[in-house]
Image: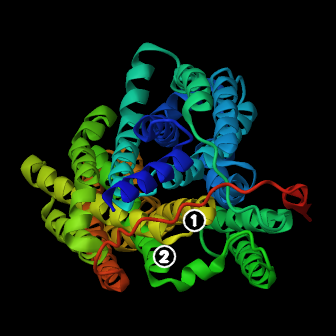
Amino acid sequence: MSGTTTAAAALRRRAAGAGANRWVVLVVLCVSLLLVAVDATVLHVAVPAVTEDLRPGGIELLWIVDVYPLVCASLLILFGTLGDRVGRRRVLLLGYTLFGVASGLAALADSAQVLIVARALLGVGGAMIMPATLSILRQVFPDRRERALAIGIWSAVAAVGAAVGPLLGGFLLEHFWWGSVFLVNIPLMLVSLPVGRLLLPESKGDGRGPWDVVGALMAAAGLFGVVLGVKRLGSGESLGSLLTMPSLVVGALLLFAFVRRQRRRTYPLVDLKMFARPAFSTSVGCIVLAMLALVGLELIAAQYLQLVLGLSPLETGLRLLPLTFAAMAAGLAGARMLRRFGPRRMVCAGFCLTAFAVVLLTALGRTDDCALMVSGFVLLGFGLETTLFGAYESMLSEAPQEQAGGAAAIGETSYQLGAGIGIALLGTVMNAAYAPGLSGVPGVPASASSSAGHSLGEAYEVAAQLGGSAGAALRHAARDAFVHGLHVTLLVSAGLLLLGAVMALRLPRVMQCEPEPVELPAPRDAAESRVSV
């Protein structure tokens, strides 16, 4: 009996890995993810240098920063489902190529318009790479125990990439020009492309029915509108502004039409029946809530460290490193915790630990309390990564193998939407709690108080223009108001995280590890490769 089981396991691995060692495949996939994660944050520290060199307008600068995540989030479902149709490895290798070419174009850009186009192409390449890495991982690790360990390593690499981006950017800017933050991608892509072509296995879905081109375009356009509207809200635009409301409305209508279209089709682009499974839909909701808390808090924490405590960008990045190291530890320990505690208790405990860390950080004030900050960031990083690991693993394991690309795209889209909503929502809460503290400052005109109420950075500028006792009073009041707003935002985040803990109670109690059936590839029919319009 054991010999039969061993032979079946070997057959599953050969079918999944196409002869390549699955752990070597994991290394290649993690390098792919690392590149995308680093590129998402590496430009942040280079914005001042880009502004000085290319002289972009305010709108152009906004697009330089935002076009990469905007395009990437919009196209995840399109390329995730396309990989299920034409081959996930093929889409991943195309993504490598485009990412390398776009990196060279961005590094050599001589105008803001060229840089915007290059960043948009980087977003297209990222949308090809991100769901493909997860879906191939789903394919080459058919055993759930091993897959859980692989996802833990994958998520730890994602945490490293997010933290390394600003540090790498800061180092390069101290020695080279701003284009160097893009050039580092090219050597890695030149290595990843032939290695990936040699080692990565090809995998596809069942290939039944035509690929829904119209549905894919509807999903891309709808997500573009929703993400654009959310990002504009996060940047301080009002809901009734000229572009924000139309983007949200048109995007929501297109997504609603996309869902209706998928329900009517015999062979849908995305099988919405997956959402009828409690484990899948709950995992997606948990990813959104976890990212909502993480990105909003990281943004506000960076402002607190730089503007209230007066730390440099490099010092700020170093202060956030404990959060990253704790997240790495949680990712590496995630497989063992999942086997021992099960998805429900693991994700629920992760949310509760994160909420406790957030409440602990409300003790931060105007003075630097390094021990408290490190403790809070360690608990925050470990709790959030525990939550994200459990949610991603449950979502990916619950999805059918032939829908791996679509499921991975849904998870990554939830990740991006959660991040955008977090910046918009927590930024709004922060502004609502911060602005009233600047009304009625002695010696400060009402117009100056109104301008200072937009942000702490603007308050410092207004205080410098006023000078004297009035400027000092405004600066002092702005700091106090920001710390008060930080505390209110942290408490709101804690409430959302506890809501996530309640949501996680719908996840399975135990980790089901039955072996998946082996599906040998069937002969391809020419009719299966047709495309529907």
Direction from residue 80 to residue 153 in the image, left or right: left
Direction from residue 377 to residue 295 in the image, left or right: right
Residue at disc 1, secondary structure: helix
- Residue 121, x across and y down, in percent: 71, 39
The residue nearer to you, when weighing 494 against 34, is 34
Q: Are marks 1 and 2 in contact (CB under 8 Å)?
A: yes
Instruction: Give residue 87's mark.
Output: none
The residue nearer to you, when weighing 453 against 391, is 391
Residue at disc 2, secondary structure: helix
Badge 2 local density, few (<14 within 10 Å), some, or many (20+)? Answer: many
Q: Quadrant of residue 217?
A: bottom right
Instruction: Give residue 280's mark.
Output: 2
Image point 46% across, 84% down: which residue?
278
The residue nearer to you, when weighing 387 against 476, is 387
Applied colour scheme: rainbow
Q: Is residue 431 in view from this perspective?
A: no
- Residue 428, x across and y down, in percent: 45, 70
Image point 40% across, 63% down: which residue?
393
Direction from residue 467 to residue 61 in the image, left or right: right
Marks 1 and 2, Cα distance to the nearest angstrom?
9 Å
Image point 37% across, 53% down: which residue?
6
Relative height, residue 338 to residue 313 (above, below): below
Residue type (three-letter) at the residue carrying disc 2: Phe
Residue type (three-letter) at the residue carrying disc 1: Ala
Relative height, residue 288 to residue 455 (above, below): below
Relative height, residue 317 to residue 97 (above, below): below
The residue beneath circle 1 is 407
Q: Is residue 267 in view from this perspective?
A: yes
- Residue 88, x across and y down, in percent: 65, 48
